[in-house]
Image (cartoon, rainbow, N blue to C red):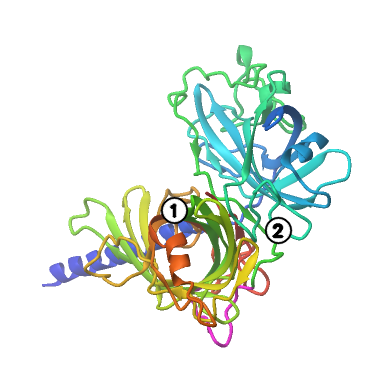
Amino acid sequence: MTGPHATHRGTRRSRARSAATAALVVLAAMVPAAVATADAQQVDTALPYACAFPSGRQQATVRVSASLPDRVEPREAIRPTRVTTTVELPAAAAVDLGVPKGGEVSAATRLTVAVAQNKATAEATWRGTVQPVTVPESGPLTLTATGDVPSVTARSTGDLTLSAGDLEIDLAVSAPDGSAAATGTPTAAATGPAPTTVRCTLDKDAPGNGLLATVPVGSVTSGPGGSPSASPTGTGPGTPSASSSASGRPQPHPGSPQSGRAPKIAGTAPGSTTDRSGVPPCRYDAQHPSDEMSLNSYITGYANVRKQKGASLIPVSCALIEQGQPDFQFPPDGNGPAVITQHSEGQLSYQGRAQTAPFKATFLTFGFVPATATMVLEQTAPLTIDSLGHMDTSTYYTTMDTYIRVPLVLRVTSLTVNGTPLDVGSSCRTRTSLSSADPEPAKHPEDHLVLHGKGEYALGEQATGYILLSGGPLTGETTIPAFTGCGAGGEDLDGLLTAAVSGPGNYIKQIQGQTCGLAAPVEGQCTKDLQPAQIPVPER
């Protein structure tokens, strides 16, 4: 009689240990660790580019700086830190953009970085954002972009190189009063057509073909004739080791069984910044008390208005989240993936109200009449976050699908048409919540917006895509209902707004930032007063 009980007891203990281990592995993978680079090489490389402006191609100088590991082991992530991309555009560029005197330019950059090791190659995108810069009266226009970039993991030994490639710059121009310039380029306060995008290509005679850095992977490699290759310690930035060719292309290592395996890019992570200017507070208070599972994060992005063939910027807003405990279900026979489910709830928070920060959008109504509206999205019931994941119990490789459901009413607080203010009153809003097709309509029959995120992570590597704790991109499509209560003094504006805005097929892309976990705040993820340290950058 003691045998079966002992076996059963052992099985339960084994399952408990497996569940605990799995939970720790999953949670550790979901929260990016703070990066500490002990032995680092500093990259600071200036490269010549040619950029295509409306009037023609113009030369520009692009300086890339970053801190990278001096050496890593196979499957150890290479995480570039302190990444800065500085673009120096000629004075003629400001004229080309139609920047008025005293105007400002804000920008977002996307630098393609080629990653190569042995015969294998991959590509990463280094994104950055530029805070508004006043255009100088004379001289070049300098834009300095900063942001987090994806890590790279080499799967075999041998020198890994990173080289700069094409560069895209989204430019937004604003007049001195903060309004959109005559070019129609949007600002954070008034969003119409997509920002002007300038595409730049690396000059053919760029030094080292754009080589930024070489990171040796594994033990000291052998150069020609079997002699050890030089360590990059003490060499200049971008200097290839002896096992690389003069062009910066790494040479295959004879006998390496994995020489053809491409380096793994940890996803093109959405950009973020730590600049808090103009960002609303995001913290728990007496009205919203926190507990050990409380998280807070920022979210921002774009929402298309299909009828206007334009997009509205949803400004950086705060979300307070009560994270649910993840539940692990292991297969009875030990074969197959473990299933992970998690249910969390949350709410938007702006000045004590469950809503986004106010935002403006400018469109050409009916194709020719300019109209500017100030709006907010008001949450009318709890926001729910449901995650479903599958984990390989032997490798802990996990994929996760997350659906965020939130009932949101669009409220209009002011409206100007063709320069004339129209009084919309205090009750102008959509009749019902924005609505999306739900993957489980029987379970969630009410009107609500649905956003979907998909993420994955492997043991020892950074999460990619969307994970609740680390954030990422969320997308969806919604129908904007008809408007009601719009107008004052007997003027009915319901029909005008309904005809101009309401309808189906409006694509939404929101970026959630890294969360701050209040129970165990992590430096780089939380400020000293327990607000999210990272501010996400909107993406189209």
Residue placed furthest toward the right: 138
Disc on the earlier residue, 1 or 2: 2
Q: Nearer the viewer, residue 374 or 79?
A: 374
Residue 283 screen position, x and y as percent:
60, 76
Q: Are marks 1 and 2 in contact (CB under 8 Å)?
A: no
Residue 242, compared with residue 24, is above or below; it is above
The alpha-carbon separation of the residues under discs 1 and 2 comes to 23 Å
**Image label count:** 2
The kind of residue tagged 1 is: Arg
Assess disc 2: are there few (<14), some (14-19) or many (≥20) residues with their C-alpha within 10 Å of its C-alpha.
some
Residue 447 painted magenta: no
Name the residue tied to disc 2.
179
- Considering the whole magenta stretch, tell me its main secondary structure: loop
Locate residue 342 relative to residue 316 in the image: left or right: left
The kind of residue tagged 2 is: Ser
For the point 66% across and 55% down, the residue is 187
